[in-house]
Image: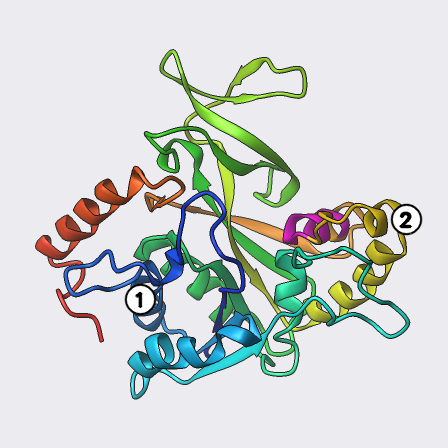
């Protein structure tokens, strides 16, 4: 069965002004998302699903969906603040969406096969799609509890224009994930990749340390776990009173790993990530895409 690609497109970029998901960076105005979808098709994915905001539907259909017609089947699902389990209401004053794992849950009714989750505004590069596509397509039918994530080498994921936030991963001797710790400030300090710890000290790590770029591989049973755990998340008083509390994918993954419910294989990739964390990253990203086109990795017009 061909896996599905689930693209999280409900958030507007906070660190980079404007609708960065629709920013044309390729030679013919291609977006980062276009390259991800092109790579996914090449890697054998059979369908794409976008999570967007309902008020963005018309513009999204016109500017985005129309491009992929005839190339790959596509569906839309919507993330809204009030998509909550029965018995729960939106806390007064809450405006922020419920986070990446809540966005994933919105696709439960349209995804019945193994699937890969990605951000829309990260350029993952083809090797990473090949690696996760192979893992998902080789899962046995009705597989459960055997998940994966692409572990990018942290040295391949930095910005020249400031710190980046990454989920730093630890693995066991079988390459299975043991923990993901979100580090919000990572950069090179005196030539070594380092993160700032809780005390504000820089801690050096190896260039090859795997980090999560939010590229996950799940089977549909993941939706059921998420729905159950989201109720626990909402039942926790501090999440109800904190109007910015978010139900992130690593939160759910850590729970499943710690409870020994599921395993998450960390797949290595040589892919170099790039993206537009900061406005100043844009020019470099445009140049890197152009050089991939020049090398023949991508045609100058994708769709």
Q: Position of residue 185 (x, y in %)?
A: 52, 28
Foreground mark, 2 or 1, reads 2
Q: Residue at x 51, y 67 (%)?
A: 136
Q: Secondary structure at mark 2?
A: helix
Please name the residue that numbered disc 1 is placed on: 34
Q: Can residue 1 be seen in this snapshot? A: no
Q: For the residue carrying disc 1, how many other residues have a C-alpha within 10 Å: few (<14), some (14-19), or many (20+)?
A: many
- Numbered-mark total: 2
Please name the residue that numbered disc 2 is placed on: 237
Q: Position of residue 9 (x, y in %)?
A: 49, 64
Q: Is residue 207 magenta?
A: no
Q: Residue at x 40, y 28 (%)?
A: 162
Q: Residue at x 39, y 60 (%)?
A: 21
Q: Earlier in the sequence, mark 2 or mark 1?
A: 1
Q: The C terminus is located in which quarter?
A: bottom left
Measured in 3D between alpha carbons, the distance from the residue under mark 2 to the one under mark 1, in whole angstroms, is 40 Å
Q: Position of residue 199 (x, y in %)?
A: 67, 15
Extent of the magenta region: 248-255
């Amino acid at each position: 069965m061909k896996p599905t690609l689930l693209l999280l497109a409900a958030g507007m970029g906070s660190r980079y002004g404007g609708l960065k998901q629709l920013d044309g960076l390729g030679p013919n105005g291609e977006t980062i998302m276009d390259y991800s979808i092109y790579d996914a098709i090449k890697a054998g994915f059979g369908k794409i699903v976008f999570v967007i905001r309902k008020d963005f539907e018309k513009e999204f259909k016109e500017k985005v969906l129309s491009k992929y017609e005839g190339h790959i089947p596509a569906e839309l699902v919507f993330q809204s603040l009030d998509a909550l389990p029965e018995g729960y209401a939106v806390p007064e004053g809450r405006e922020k969406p419920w986070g990446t794992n809540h966005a994933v849950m919105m696709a439960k009714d349209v995804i019945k096969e193994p699937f890969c989750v990605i951000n829309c505004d990260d350029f993952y590069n083809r090797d990473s799609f090949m690696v996760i596509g192979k893992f998902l397509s080789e899962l046995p039918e009705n597989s459960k509890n055997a998940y994966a994530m692409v572990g990018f080498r942290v040295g391949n994921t930095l910005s020249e224009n400031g710190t980046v936030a990454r989920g730093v991963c630890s693995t066991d001797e079988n390459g299975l994930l043991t923990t993901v710790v979100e580090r919000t400030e990572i950069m090179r300090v005196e030539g070594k990749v380092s993160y700032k710890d809780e005390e504000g000290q820089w801690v050096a790590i190896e260039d090859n340390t795997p980090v999560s770029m939010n590229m996950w591989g799940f089977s549909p049973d993941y939706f059921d776990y998420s729905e159950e755990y989201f109720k626990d998340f909402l039942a926790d008083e501090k999440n109800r009173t904190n109007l910015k509390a978010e139900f992130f994918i690593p939160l759910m993954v850590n729970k499943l790993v710690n409870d020994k419910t599921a395993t998450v294989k960390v797949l290595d990739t040589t892919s170099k990530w790039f993206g537009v964390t900061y406005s100043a990253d844009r020019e470099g990203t445009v140049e890197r895409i152009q050089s991939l086109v020049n090398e023949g990795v991508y045609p100058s017009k994708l769709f």
